Protein backbone atom coordinates (compact mmCIF):
# COMPACT_ATOMS: atom_id res chain seq x y z
CA UNK A 1 0.00 0.00 0.00
CA UNK A 2 1.24 3.45 -0.79
CA UNK A 3 1.69 6.23 1.72
CA UNK A 4 0.61 9.86 1.71
CA UNK A 5 4.22 10.90 1.14
CA UNK A 6 4.58 8.58 -1.87
CA UNK A 7 1.29 9.75 -3.35
CA UNK A 8 2.28 13.41 -3.00
CA UNK A 9 5.63 12.69 -4.64
CA UNK A 10 3.95 10.94 -7.57
CA UNK A 11 1.41 13.76 -7.93
CA UNK A 12 4.24 16.32 -7.98
CA UNK A 13 5.66 14.67 -11.10
CA UNK A 14 2.46 15.39 -13.03
CA UNK A 15 1.09 18.64 -14.46
CA UNK A 16 -1.05 20.64 -12.02
CA UNK A 17 -4.24 19.94 -13.97
CA UNK A 18 -3.63 16.20 -14.41
CA UNK A 19 -6.59 14.27 -13.01
CA UNK A 20 -4.37 11.46 -11.72
CA UNK A 21 -2.27 14.01 -9.86
CA UNK A 22 -5.40 15.51 -8.33
CA UNK A 23 -6.63 12.07 -7.25
CA UNK A 24 -3.23 11.16 -5.78
CA UNK A 25 -3.17 14.41 -3.82
CA UNK A 26 -6.66 13.67 -2.55
CA UNK A 27 -5.59 10.15 -1.56
CA UNK A 28 -2.77 11.63 0.48
CA UNK A 29 -5.07 14.09 2.23
CA UNK A 30 -7.61 11.35 2.95
CA UNK A 31 -4.87 9.24 4.56
CA UNK A 32 -3.82 12.26 6.63
CA UNK A 33 -7.38 12.86 7.77
CA UNK A 34 -8.00 9.23 8.74
CA UNK A 35 -4.83 9.35 10.80
CA UNK A 36 -5.84 12.62 12.40
CA UNK A 37 -9.26 11.21 13.31
CA UNK A 38 -7.58 8.68 15.58
CA UNK A 39 -6.24 11.33 17.95
CA UNK A 40 -8.44 14.40 17.40
CA UNK A 41 -10.90 15.42 20.08
CA UNK A 42 -13.91 17.68 20.44
CA UNK A 43 -14.57 20.39 17.89
CA UNK A 44 -11.34 19.65 16.06
CA UNK A 45 -12.44 16.04 15.52
CA UNK A 46 -15.77 17.26 14.17
CA UNK A 47 -14.00 19.58 11.75
CA UNK A 48 -11.65 16.82 10.57
CA UNK A 49 -14.59 14.47 10.10
CA UNK A 50 -16.53 17.04 8.07
CA UNK A 51 -13.53 17.65 5.82
CA UNK A 52 -13.04 13.91 5.42
CA UNK A 53 -16.69 13.32 4.49
CA UNK A 54 -16.68 16.12 1.93
CA UNK A 55 -13.38 15.08 0.38
CA UNK A 56 -14.43 11.43 0.15
CA UNK A 57 -17.67 12.36 -1.59
CA UNK A 58 -15.88 14.48 -4.20
CA UNK A 59 -13.07 11.96 -4.60
CA UNK A 60 -15.37 8.98 -4.96
CA UNK A 61 -17.43 10.74 -7.62
CA UNK A 62 -14.31 11.60 -9.62
CA UNK A 63 -13.02 8.04 -9.43
CA UNK A 64 -16.39 6.59 -10.46
CA UNK A 65 -16.70 8.92 -13.43
CA UNK A 66 -13.10 9.05 -14.63
CA UNK A 67 -10.69 6.55 -13.14
CA UNK A 68 -12.73 3.35 -12.85
CA UNK A 69 -13.89 3.20 -16.48
CA UNK A 70 -10.30 3.71 -17.62
CA UNK A 71 -8.99 1.16 -15.11
CA UNK A 72 -11.53 -1.37 -16.29
CA UNK A 73 -10.44 -0.95 -19.92
CA UNK A 74 -6.70 -0.76 -19.31
CA UNK A 75 -6.08 -2.91 -16.23
CA UNK A 76 -9.05 -5.23 -16.48
CA UNK A 77 -12.18 -5.91 -14.52
CA UNK A 78 -10.30 -7.63 -11.69
CA UNK A 79 -8.27 -4.49 -10.95
CA UNK A 80 -11.33 -2.25 -11.19
CA UNK A 81 -13.16 -4.56 -8.78
CA UNK A 82 -10.24 -4.38 -6.35
CA UNK A 83 -10.42 -0.58 -6.38
CA UNK A 84 -14.17 -0.73 -5.83
CA UNK A 85 -13.56 -2.98 -2.83
CA UNK A 86 -11.08 -0.47 -1.39
CA UNK A 87 -13.66 2.29 -1.65
CA UNK A 88 -16.27 0.11 0.04
CA UNK A 89 -13.86 -0.54 2.92
CA UNK A 90 -13.11 3.16 3.27
CA UNK A 91 -16.83 3.88 3.43
CA UNK A 92 -17.23 1.28 6.19
CA UNK A 93 -14.42 2.84 8.21
CA UNK A 94 -15.96 6.26 7.72
CA UNK A 95 -19.37 4.99 8.86
CA UNK A 96 -17.75 3.44 11.95
CA UNK A 97 -16.20 6.78 12.83
Image (cartoon, helix red, strand yellow):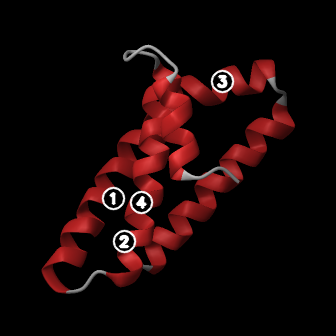
Q: Is 47 left, or right, of 27 in this rendering?
A: left
Q: Name the residue beneath numbered marker 2.
A: 36
> Going 18% across and 75% down the picture, which residue do you hit?
44
Q: Residue 55 in the image: x percent, y percent?
A: 34, 48
Relative to 83, 19 lies left or right = left
* Extreme residue toward the left, this view: 43
Tell me, yes or no, whether the two marked residues, 2 and 4, touch with CB atoms within 8 Å. yes
- Give the secondary structure at mark 2: helix
**Which secondary structure, mark 1?**
helix
Would you name the residue on which mark 1 appears? 53
In this rendering, is residue 89 above or below 44? above
Q: Nearer the viewer, mark 4 or mark 3?
A: 4
| Disc number for residue 62 | none
Q: Who's the residue at 19% across and 68% down the image?
A: 47
Q: Can residue 64 be seen in this view?
A: no
- Disc 4 marks which residue? 32
The structure residue drawn at horizontal position 24% and vertical position 77%, both measured from the top left corner, is 45
Instruction: Give the CA distance from mark 3 to mark 2.
Output: 31 Å
Amino acid sequence: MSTAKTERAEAAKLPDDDVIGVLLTQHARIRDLFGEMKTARGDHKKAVFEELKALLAVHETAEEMIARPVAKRSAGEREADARNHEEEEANKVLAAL
